Image (cartoon, rainbow, N blue to C red):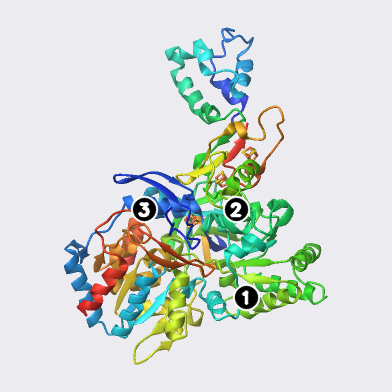
Amino acid sequence: MVSAMEIYQLLPQAACKECGYVSCMALAVALLSREKKLEDCPSLFDPKYADKLNKLKELLAPLEQASETGLIIHDEKCFGCANCVVACPVNVANDPTGSAIGLGPKSDKVILVIENGVVRCLNPNECRRFGPNRILCNACTATCPSKAIEFV
Amino acid sequence: MGIDLRIITFRDIFQYEAGKKSRFSPEFQNLSAQIIMDKDDMVQLGLKDGQNVCLENEMSKIVVKAIQTDDEPHPGLAFMTNSPWSNQLVKDNINDRIIPDFKAILVQASASNESVTNLAELLERLRH
Amino acid sequence: MAVCTGCSLLCEDIEVALKTGAIEKAKNLCRKGQGHFQALFSDRTVPSVEGGETSLDQAIEKAANILMNAKDPLLYGWSNSSLEAQKVGIELAKKLEAKIDDTSSFCQGQLLERVLKGELPSCTLDDVRNFADVSVFWGADPSNSHPRHLSRFSYYPRGSKRQKGYEEERNCVVIDVRKSSTAKLCSDYFRIPPGGDAEFAEAIIAILDGKMPRFGDKKRMIGLASIFKKADFGAIFPGLGLVYSLVQKMEIFENLVARLNDVSNYKVVPMVGHYNMRGFNELMLDETGYINQISFKNGVHHGSENSVTMAAKSSDACLVVGSDPLSALPFVIARSLAKSQLVVIDPRRSLTTDAAKVVIPSAMSGLESGGKAVRMDGVRISFEPIFESNLLSDEEILTRIMEAI
Ligand code: SF4
Ligand code: SF4
Ligand code: SF4
């Protein structure tokens, strides 16, 4: 997992405060939690930081796909085994004749599906880790053989 | 200096996928020409993760990449996928057993400066 | 819906959207199945003789020629062909008085034979999903070999008698020499030393007989035996780890299964790898009384001398259908095959096609040609082609070779 320190090391470290924070470290933390975007740091777009900017983009790419629930999928690790699809309680509740019994989803109200050999997240808002009544569900990560799903 | 290892073959979905796409691809070679070793065994041979190791027995000799295991310690045991590489080392004295020793390949392992044995070399050996 | 012929689970819920020359989107295929489908678009074979491209007719004629003139031909492969193709293959072996064998010889043959002859109790995977509360993977790692096994049948799905989640209603036991991907997921992992399978089985039998186990951590072994005893319905999935370790001691495993059936209800489903290996073994059993390793020279003879691992060295010609023994078998055996008059029917390029005297390209079974196959648990599954293709199926090619002979 990316750490705030790794992000910090790639920032200009000029403490210009243009992002609204007093230090670059504070921005690093905000970038990690996806409260701020790289565009919030204008100095970074100076050509002399081009290298660092590219590295940062790479580093933060997985975070960018993180849904509002913080769910990140690492395609390259995924087996496409559908353990998560079948174990997800929302999939089970919304799709009793498909994913609940081990088959491909038959409802479009499911969160997780398998496409092109890897998992995809369709309806992140349905996730039990989201919304006012959220709970710390981990059915998808606990059944994954390869840590292909992660919450940040 | 070398050490004795028993190699056990196992299945890996990524190696399988690479072999499906092409037996002749660099990915298939990378994922096949490697051996998962115990940390202490690697220390004994002075090997760091990803360095080359020579595996030799009366059947053949190959050079592959050593990968440090993330499992509990298993000194003396190592793991390779079934592939043209591991098959170089499998004995054929099968007699009545019919089943070759895919899961009991005994070899001498030592650090190596040579490059990883490539598929072209294995194909060449098949022809002679 | 398409059927995936990527492994012997033959998943039937695959949805594929096509565009010309590519798959636009595939739903429900695991990574292994996705690789299998993508294989359509790379490394395809062309008809060739002695390394030079020819017409299909010439390749078939040359193949027939080699097989006809061989003194001791071996016909090998079969587990990646439809039942229809396998039937023609067996007829061809009879006509040529050839040896015939498949991958089961050095794979699940020993166990599958006992299942097919009714010596080991078995059940369908649908039964496992609906009723099983204990699944045992012994020397098997389905996460890598049969990626959807746990999610479709053996651990995570809801079933008619298993309505609650897996944590409440199912135990998954893994016995292996390494902490495989499946071992990381299961509820009870037992690490055994290589070759320790027999002692492990004996220890469980001892506990069931009221004795102390002489193997492993006593407390954990007794705990496992009590999981086994309490189960309503247990399914054991032996993999190659168990088969290779117990080669000549399979009766120990049979004893264990028998003992488990004294205390509860246990079934065995061998982890067949290729999509239709079981189909070939069933056909052979009907035809000859044995599942593999047959010679049709002057009658029907069964014996290890007809297994691919032995016959590769003695046969002067070999027909390989849908298999890559030069990759999968020990080098010395591969080299003998490479030096024989080798004829290969395969949709894709492999080490074996590269060494062959004759290569005949075929349609990919399940993708470009239809047919029937037998899932690892004995359920018959039919499939239709999902891609149009002018390529001949294995069945058609074998029929044409037959006609030419
Ligand atoms: S956290 Fe729970 S609800 Fe959300 S996707 Fe994962 S399994 Fe489903
Ligand atoms: S995310 Fe994990 S559990 Fe889900 S399909 Fe991929 S490998 Fe399987
Ligand atoms: S589990 Fe086997 S049959 Fe099912 S999609 Fe994966 S490779 Fe295909």
Residues at marks 2 and 1 on the same chain: no
Q: Quadrant of residue C44?
A: bottom left
Circle on res. C39: 3
Residue C57 on image: x %, y %: 17, 68
Marks 3 and 2: which is nearer the front?
Answer: 2
Q: Using the image, name the chain to which the residue with label 1 belongs.
A: C
Q: Is mark 2 within 8 Å of ligand 3?
A: no
Q: Is residue B57 above or below residue A55?
A: below
Q: What kind of residue is marked 2?
A: Ile
Question: Same chain for the residues at labels 1 and 3, yes or no?
Answer: yes
Cα separation, mark 2 vs mark 1, equals 25 Å
Distance (Cα) linking label 1 and label 3: 37 Å
Q: Residue C91: x percent and y percent?
A: 33, 80
Q: Dot 1: what SS?
A: loop
SS label for mark 3 = helix
Disc sitting over residue C121 in the figure = 1
